[in-house]
Amino acid sequence: MQPEQVAAYLQHQMPEAREIEVAQLFRISGGASRETWSCDATWDQGGARVERGLILRRDPEASLLETERYVEFRVYQALQGSGVPVPEVFWLEDDAKWLERSFFVMARLAGEASPQRLLATAFDGKADDVAQQKIDILARIHALDWQAKRLDFLGVPESTSACATREIDRWESIMREQTLEPQPALELGIAWLRAHQPVAQKIALVHADYRTGNFLVDGGRITGVLDWEMVHLGDPLEDVAWVCLRSWRWAGDARMGGLFARDDFYRRYQEASGLTVDPDAVRFWEVLGNLKLAVIFLTGARSFIEGRSKDPIHAFTAHLNPEIEAEILRLIA
Amino acid sequence: MRPNAEEIVRGVQTSLLSIVLPEVQTEYTRTQVTLMYVLLGIVANSLDGAHERLLADNGTLRELAARAANTVGTQDVLANELRSLASTEPSPRLSELSSANMALAEALAGVTSSDAPELASIREQVIDWLRADAEARSLGLMGPRTDG
């Protein structure tokens, strides 16, 4: 991707703008399915010079996860002004003539997302504030009136008892499609999940990748929740369990996402959301979460093995699967 | 004397870290180089002992398959498959050992997915092996447990 290509696209979208310049174009690490690029754009408009930090989310050549770009884009649109901090989104582009592949453009928000850097600064020295915001925002996501926001295009589960089945079906089918070898541990996990399905307290918007690393922190304030690639409607405890996965205990201790102990998280989430955290249901969703991670990594491994991806992350993450399998077998024992 | 495969890979790893990484300008590319370094470490670790590990794994799986075959009964399709896999001679080739490992794992998955009471004991043994195998192959990157 070159700055001139981005400038040409901005000119196409803003014909009234003059002297468009794009600088500091670079790729940001992370993102399970879409490339993330940052740039500074400036242009003349109405006699003034406008400056804007932009993020471009471009479809990859191959990814850990196949998701539809319009889903993420439309959810970002729907969440504007909802109390859930998200970046403003501008354009969704399917024409590959601009940047070789489809992409969308959104505003760049201030803040740091890297878990390692956030931990190094103890979340700007305000870890407890960030912890509470993380919980409050999650409760806000789960309280959102998704019907009023016209998010039913995400697919509405038939009932509160269908949320679990839908997610098992979704990830089992991707596993069967992507795996290149037998997966006995994952098969055991799937069988256990089918026998232990909880009934959701409500059908809510589920971020489905809500963790330290997927929100921006600036001066001890969460400025944006990112990476809505797996968003869907379902059981809010799915997000609660995802927060608790051992894979996100970045600090190397028992704190979830480097922020809070499990019991503290449950208590504060219950207060913020008015929902009850049933440990058995969370255990179910933790098993599902680990299965999901393993399947995402299998998908990446396959694209690497078949030569569709040259990204080393796709080779590396597959080597995380034995530990995830061990975790599944431990949780279902 | 010349460096063996493992020594070459470890040498390339060192070069990546000491020569390439300091020259890299962007954070994204630094992350990519670091990942390549980690991947080469995985390769180097697997170069020495991969054959022995697969031989040992397949030996354990064959033993489990033979036990499962006897429990399932003589007429069963699964029993025949397990018996046939249990009696296969180990190959000296890594690729064939790996294929045999997959075939054994697949056949034993038939045991773990069965809820037949007579298979309960062998089922537990297979699950124990799966657990031990997964733990042995873990990179140890997950955080600590909080639930005992």
Image (tube, rainbow, N blue to C red):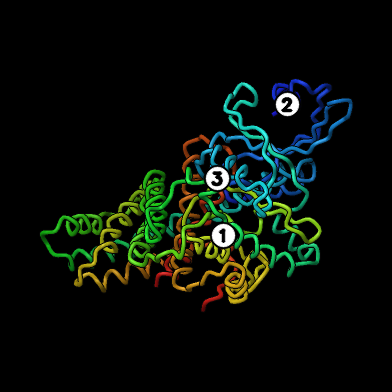
Label 1 environment density (alpha carbons within 10 Å; few <14, some 14–19, many ≥20): some
First reached walking from the N terminus: tag 1 or tag 3: 1
Q: What residue is rendered at 26% in x and 54% in y?
A: B88
Dot 3 lies on which element?
helix
Circle 1 or circle 2, nearest the eye = 1
Please give the label number shown on residue A10.
2
Towards the viewer: A134 or A196: A134
Image spot of residue A114 (x, y percent): 71, 54
Residue farthest to the front?
A: A148
Dot 2 lies on which element?
helix
* Kind of residue at disc 2: Leu
1 and 2 marks on the same chain: yes
Residue at mark 1 to residue at mark 3: CA–CA distance:
35 Å
Rendering quarter of residue A93: top right
Circle 3 or circle 2, nearest the eye = 2
**Residue A187 visible in rendering:** yes
* Kind of residue at disc 1: Ala
* A128 with respect to B138 (left or right): right
Circle 1 or circle 3, nearest the eye = 1
Q: What residue is rendered at 30% in x and 56% in y?
A: B104
Quick one: quadrant of the C terminus of chain A?
A: bottom left
Label 3 environment density (alpha carbons within 10 Å; few <14, some 14–19, many ≥20): many
Q: Which residue is mark 1?
A: A143
Q: Which residue is mark 3?
A: A314
Chain letter behind tag 2 = A
1 and 3 marks on the same chain: yes
Chain letter behind tag 1 = A
